Image: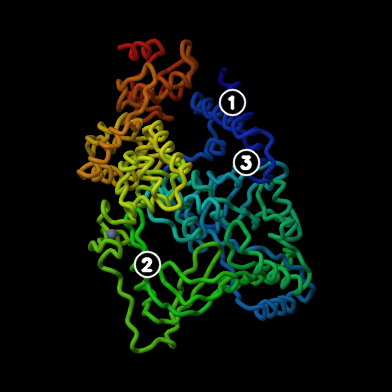
Amino acid sequence: MNNSEAKLEIERLSNELNRHNHLYYVESNPEISDYDFDMLLQQLHDLEEQFPEFVSDQSPTKRVGGDITKKFQSVTHKYAMLSLSNSYSKDEIQEWVTRAKKFVEDDLEYVCELKYDGVAIGIQYVDGKLVQAVTRGDGSQGENVTSNVKTIRTIPLQLSNDFPQDFEIRGEIFFPLKNFHALNEKRRESGDPEFANPRNTASGTLKMQDSKVVSERGLDCFLYGIYGADGRADGHFELVEKSSEWGFKVPPSNERYIEKTNSVQGVMDFINYWDEKRKDLPFEIDGVVIKVNNYDQQEILGFTAKSPRWAIAYKFKAERVETILEEVTYQVGRTGAITPVANLKPVQLGGTTVKRASLHNADQIEKLNLHLGDSVYVEKGGEIIPKIVGVNMDARSTSSASVEFLNHCPECNSELIRREGEVQHYCPNELDCPPQVKGKIEHFISRKALNIDGLGAETVDALFAAELIKDIADLFTLTFDDVVNLDRMADKSANNLIDGIAASKEIPFERVLFGLGIRFVGETVAKKLAKAFKNIDELAKASFEDLITVDEIGDKIAMSIQAFFWEDRNKEVVARLKEAGLQMEIVEKEGSSNKFEGLSFVVSGVFETFSRNDLKAAIESNGGKNVGSISAKTSFVVAGDKMGTSKLQKATDLGVKILSEQEFIQLLKD
Ligand SMILES: [Zn+2]
């Protein structure tokens, strides 16, 4: 492929991928399978590597992230990004309407919209290309988070049809509840503390330095405020509809996410409808927004210093009740993290009876200044567990005692510790504290680890109570007779369980490693470690330096791994697992070695003997690493035919050694 052919093909693939992306994410109406989509993306990616001079900033390959932002640049908003004035009662809405009508001296149409509980964003498009995305910041200046925003699949990188030449569109980036819960599930598995709410997590995610991580988290966005597209429509509602033709995911009017009405009654209907239905939404909202539709009328109404006069937010009252705090108890998690739980006098809230609320940690208790017997306010938002938001001080008895955080573990009485910089208290007695021991066994048998058939949390409890197991290795000494004597255990289930345990000996090493429950070693990290160290013995004796040279392994994980293998009892458990016949090394494919250990390669161009993918596979199976772009750290560039001249130049400039295909093959043989 020559240069001009490559340029055309990159454009063709980009357009095709943008179209399919839109069909999938915005219209939920895909034409091709996920697999075919990935293949197209791979084709584009390969071609871009070969011809880096034609990579555009709007390339669909930017969706997967990879750009690192060290410090977010501050940007001045072209149109001030004001916040709306809030109201909490329908009377205030009525007053706002009356004032607006008086001002305009005419009838008004209103647009009602959802008030998404997320992070406001302003995105600039020039010639149909996404060029910049900026957070609200203080309203006049925000942060440039463009590379992170590009990873959000519902935001178009390239517009289609008759879009304005240079304009800004605003909306709200939020965390869909499904993705938020999945993220927390993953964090639970790797022993990281869970995130408390979707809004703050969305905001934190948007400001992460590594856009690849942002890409994986699955943020979403609705766009609905268009600036600089004068004359395209008379009213806000019409312009939002129009902008969907340019490729934006706008709030759907058929689901009543946006609605136009000419009466106050219509506004009230919208408020009432969503006050009731908001709990069914797949994301969180905290109110609705009402705007005057017509742009001319908006202009007449103008702005106050802080907010537009043509719009107002109505905030839903959080469902809040008052009840008595009877007791604070403490839960001990698998990793020893202590979570305080408020035990409440049962009360009805949002259609369910609430008896408990999470208090998260000691700081939270202190912040609320809780006393036992206090009358507390409890709120519930979305699906999140209820929380205590305050204390009714007038109702406090003078004799009540303040809540003091525990000093000792409620399960094993060990003295609790709190590591520097962490908010959570921990029970350090990892190996003997019952909930930690049981939690570790439950993790070991869970679906993504050993996935043992016929064994669940209840059975683990029973086996533990009967003193048949006290660590994960004990599972492999269980006999049919041991198990069948447990309560409610039939012959058939006992057989299933024993068979399930036997079958788990075939589970690959990386899943066994994940199952060990080493703190911060989640599924992905376990895979990386397995690949890098090949077997448990090499991993156990790896030095701190060995560990941190592995991709994605940082100080925190490395220390945690070392601490695990320093502990004699962990070593003993690992030895017993090995003896029981579990997979403690990865099964090597033929032709593999460690000869490229620590070396990084950039593969570019077209080859005779190898396909590019085979060549890359050969590098990896010999311990080397494939990287996308040339830097001073690159060990070798393997250059095929038709490699881009700018790449060759860069390699030469940086003094990176360039190998021909034949030289590479020689290196493999040596
Ligand atoms: Zn304990």
Q: Secondary structure beneath disc 3?
A: loop
Q: Secondary structure beneath disc 1?
A: helix
Give left or right: position of 291 versus 670. Answer: right
Give left or right: position of 250 versus 415. Answer: right
Residue 209's tag is none
Residues packed near mark 2 inside 10 Å, few (<14), some (14 to 19) or many (20 plus): many
Which residue position holds label 1?
A: 7
Quadrant containing the C terminus in the rendered view: top left
Quadrant in the rendering for residue 56: top right
Give left or right: position of 162 versus 528. Answer: right
Viewer-side residue, 333 vs 113? 333
Q: What residue type is labelled 3?
A: Gln
Q: What residue type is labelled 1?
A: Lys
Which residue position holds label 3?
A: 158
Regarding residue 211, the answer to whether it shows in the image is no
Mark 1 and mark 2: Cα distance apart in space:
60 Å
Q: Which residue is drawn at 35% across and 45% down?
A: 482
Q: Which of marks 1 and 3 is nearer the N terminus?
A: 1
Q: Is residue 68 above or below residue 358?
A: above
Residues packed near mark 1 inside 10 Å, few (<14), some (14 to 19) or many (20 plus): some
Q: Which amino acid does label 2 sit on?
A: Pro
- Can you tell which of label 1 and label 2 is closer to the viewer? 2
Q: Residue at x 43, y 30 (%)?
A: 628
Mark 1 and mark 3: Cα distance apart in space:
17 Å
Q: Earlier in the sequence, mark 2 or mark 3?
A: 3
Q: Regarding ligand 1, which quadrant of the image does it lie in?
A: bottom left
Mark 2 and mark 3: Cα distance apart in space:
49 Å
From the top left corner, tell me how far across and down residue 365 is, in percent.
Answer: 36, 72
From the top left corner, tell me how far across and down residue 259 is, in percent.
Answer: 73, 62
Residue 340's tag is 2
Q: Which residue is drawn at 62% across and 72% down?
A: 314
